[in-house]
Amino acid sequence: MNAADIQGRSGQHGTSLRRTMRFILLLGIVSLFADMTYEGAHGITGPFLSLLGATAAAAGITAGMGELIGYGIRLVSGYLADRTGRYWSITLIGYTINLVAVPLLALAGRWQVAAFLIVAERLGKAIRTPARDAMLSHATREIGRGWGFGLHEAMDQVGAILGPIIVSVILRLRGGYHVAFGILLIPALVALLVLILARMQYPSPEKLERDTEAGETPDATNTRFLPRVFWLYLSFVAVSVAGYVHFQLISYHFKTLSVVSDVLIPVLFALAMGVDALVALLIGRLYDSIGLLSLMAVPLLALPISALTFSRGYHAVVVGVLLWGAVMGIQETIMRAAIADMISPGRRGVAYGIFNTVYGLSWFLGSTIMGLLYGVSIAQVILFSIALQVVSVPLLFAVRRELSAT
């Protein structure tokens, strides 16, 4: 190979790398403004339902129904994305429902209408997430799975921090709930416009995933069945996530025992989201260096969370919340990145759909058990959480052994 060929290939690689980075950044911007929209709304939907006359039971059923649909439908949407190949269409439909539902809350005058829109927002997210993640996985092959998903998660969490802050400022200025929901139309429209731009510039994201040695797109054939290692991996995810304390229970503890003031609770949550964004970038790089072993950080960091957050000491709960945000950053980054390395391109939509469904159901079941245990003894909550994190460790090593054998 002569110098001209080497220089030509180097130039092609540089161009390809820039294209993949642009695609990841575009999807990151979409997630940033989308999170500003629905995360900004999430903090006030409960009080808003109460204002419209909903009972506590109605509010609870609405939240539960939204989360159940939000994770359960992902299995179906992921399957449809792979079956039809219409990843962009499904992503666009999902984002539209997800984002339009939020500003429409500004027009809700009855709690039943508001409840319908809250559930619709979760439905939209369920529809678009597997297809979006599958497209994102194509772009992360060249720059590194961990770094690509980490960068996306970091931008996502910037929006998760800004949205609640914007809503808080509006309410402080006495704008009211309806005004707050109406203002969120702005980031919703920005997210949809950037998404359309990404669709126009990258109509076939699968072309971004190429064999770096041969320069060809990976073969997507022989993808009828998901490999055994994927199901082993799901067992690790299910056990680990079931033992991961939900912030709703943590904040309930803070409020019930007056561990921190009401004003500081959302501040601590915002701080956790900031840690999430930072850790996402760091753990993404680590995953690209050492692979699945980096997921050991999940049980190691999660082990002390329950003991710290369910204590009565201010400094202890702050450390616990910071660790909670770090684990969330790891889960949202390399737990997703690992799937792209296990599953061939033609089956990633259904794989991400199954992953998200298992993740949501495991967290729901674990949170329910911990909520029941909390009413009996806080010590039992702590022991339950620690036990599941310990059990998850040998499952992760089983996944590593299976990968080594294939």
Image (spheres, rainbow, N blue to C red):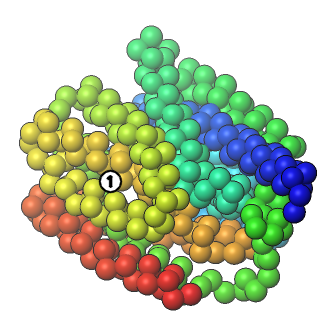
The residue drawn where x is 79% and y is 77% is 219
Look at 62% across and 34% down and name the residue there.
33
Left or right: 142 in relation to 121 = right
Q: Quadrant of the C terminus?
A: bottom right
Q: Residue furthest front?
A: 2
Instruction: State which quadrant residue 378 falls in.
Output: bottom left
Of 300 and 241, nearer the camera is: 300
**SS assignment at label 1:** loop
Vertical placement of residue 87 versus 339, above or below:
above
Provide residue 230's location: percent of width, then percent of height. 54, 79
Give coordinates of residue 73: x percent, y percent.
61, 65
Above or below, 264 against 327 in this view is: above
**Can residue 109 be seen at all in this image of the molecule?**
no
Circle 1 residues within 10 Å: few <14, some 14–19, many ≥20: some
| Residue depicted at x 78% and y 57% | 208
Query: Which sits in the foreground, 362 or 394?
Result: 394
Q: Quadrant of the N terminus?
A: bottom right
- Residue beneath the point at 78% across and 46% down: 14
**Residue with the most extreme top position:** 173
Rendered position, 339 above or below 49 = below
> Mark 1 belongs to which amino acid?
His
Residue 399, given in percent of the width and then of the height, sits at 44, 80
Residue 279 visible, this angle: yes
Vertical position of residue 252 compared to residue 29: above or below:
below
Q: Is residue 99 left or right of residue 385?
A: right
Label 1 belongs to which residue? 246
